[in-house]
Image (cartoon, helix red, strand yellow):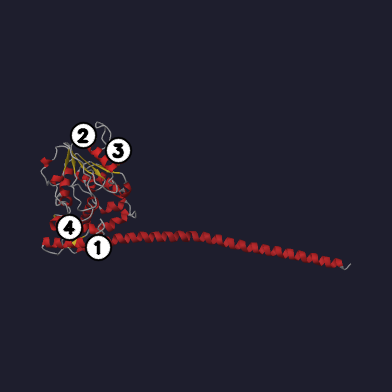
Amino acid sequence: MSLLPQAVRNLARQRQRRVAGQVKQVARQGEHGVINATKSILRRLRRPVRAISRRKALLEKQWGYFRTEWQIERELETIIARGRPLVVGPWISEVGFEALYWIPFLHWVQTAFRLDPDRLIAVSRGGVGGWYQGVASRYIEIWDLMDPVEFARRNAERGVTKQYERSPLDEDIVAAVARSLGTDEFDVLHPGLMYRLFTLYWSGHRAMGFMDAHTRFTRIDAPPLIDPALLPRDYIAVKFYAARSLPDTPEMRAQLRTLVHRLSERMPVVLLDTGLVLDDDHADYAFAGSGRIVSARPWLTPQTNLGVQTQIVAGARAFVGTCGSIAWLAPRLGVDTSALYVDPKWLHAHLAVAMRAYHKLGAGRFAAADLRAIDVLTPADASSPVRGLD
């Protein structure tokens, strides 16, 4: 009979252990539940914190861009406030950037600070004094101060085409300008200011309105540098040069040669193939001439080559060429322009500026086209893809 109470006690202890285990399990589950609930709350709290942190970083970056813009404008104000003559330049960079950005930027500076053109002295190369009409009443030709071959060598030694800062070549040209003027009592408005400012747009940190606010596009006239009788009565001006957007390959040369000859079947062609590589890294394509294809080479010297090209383009029925360089200038001369490329990767920002500016200017029409989309074997009597001939 004594075994029964012992069995009852054992059963009671088993149930106690089972209940205790269940209690511990419930406690553990409760602890995990509390932890998980806490984690969920923390995650929800962290989301807006992270969003605020990201927004703060973005605002700090945007604020940095504004500071850059304001700093450059303060530099301009400081230079201009001195009241001394202003040398604008020297421009030793790419032709296209001078036409599309530098000169419109100077027009904005002149308007914003109410500058008298008699105070400004433009310094550039290739006889482009006419490009600065309305901005600077005086123009100094770099290649009257320095041998063009020496200039090309030293410019290549800079290792860059852009002018973000003053180089030893810039300094030597400024010193030569001082000797030419007979005084060094002037300030320099260097292209580096423009490059630093417009990098905010080229890098995608500013929209098109930023460019509208800092440029002024105007029509220009081309002063005569050669006898107009040398040119055909009606003609198309053509300038193709090798660039990243239009690379020099045998296939490209063949396609361009065919295009030039097709154009000459419609109207005489004047080729702006200078044979000079003096101021940037672009070499002209050269095509054999015929009775209806004329090369401008005999009329060009280093000191006047860009000025003469400007005169030729201004007198043309249309301009056709590589997208860049003179193509950025031709619409401001009132000439319909077809700018061609095969790789637009390097052109997107510039095309947007050009198409917007020239549409608003209402001078020459501007059209850019992928050369691969143009069938150069179209019969000569078909509708022309070239602006000015349709």
Q: Are marks 2 and 3 in contact (CB under 8 Å)?
A: no
The amino acid at mark 3 is: Ile
Q: CA distance from mark 4 to mark 1?
A: 32 Å
Q: Marks 4 and 3, Cα distance to the nearest angstrom?
A: 41 Å
Image quarter in which the N terminus is found: bottom right
Q: Depth-wise, is mark 3 or mark 1 nearer the camera?
A: 3
* CA neighbours of label 2 inside 10 A, class few (<14), some (14 to 19), many (20+): few
* Residue 265: image tag: 2
Q: Is residue 123 visible?
A: no
Q: Earlier in the sequence, mark 3 or mark 1?
A: 1
Q: Nearer the viewer, residue 293 or 211?
A: 293
Quadrant of residue 35 within the rendered picture: bottom right
Q: Quadrant of the C terminus?
A: top left
In this picture, residue 308 sits left or right of residue 367: left
- Label disc, if present, on residue 374 of the rendered structure: 3
Question: Crowdedness of circle 3 by 10 Å Cα count: few (<14), some, many (20+)?
Answer: some
For the point 32% across and 59% down, which residue is it?
A: 66
Q: Is residue 88 left or right of residue 21?
A: left
Residue at the disc numbered 1: 75
In front of the other: 202 or 172: 172
**Closer to viewer: mark 4 or mark 3:** 4
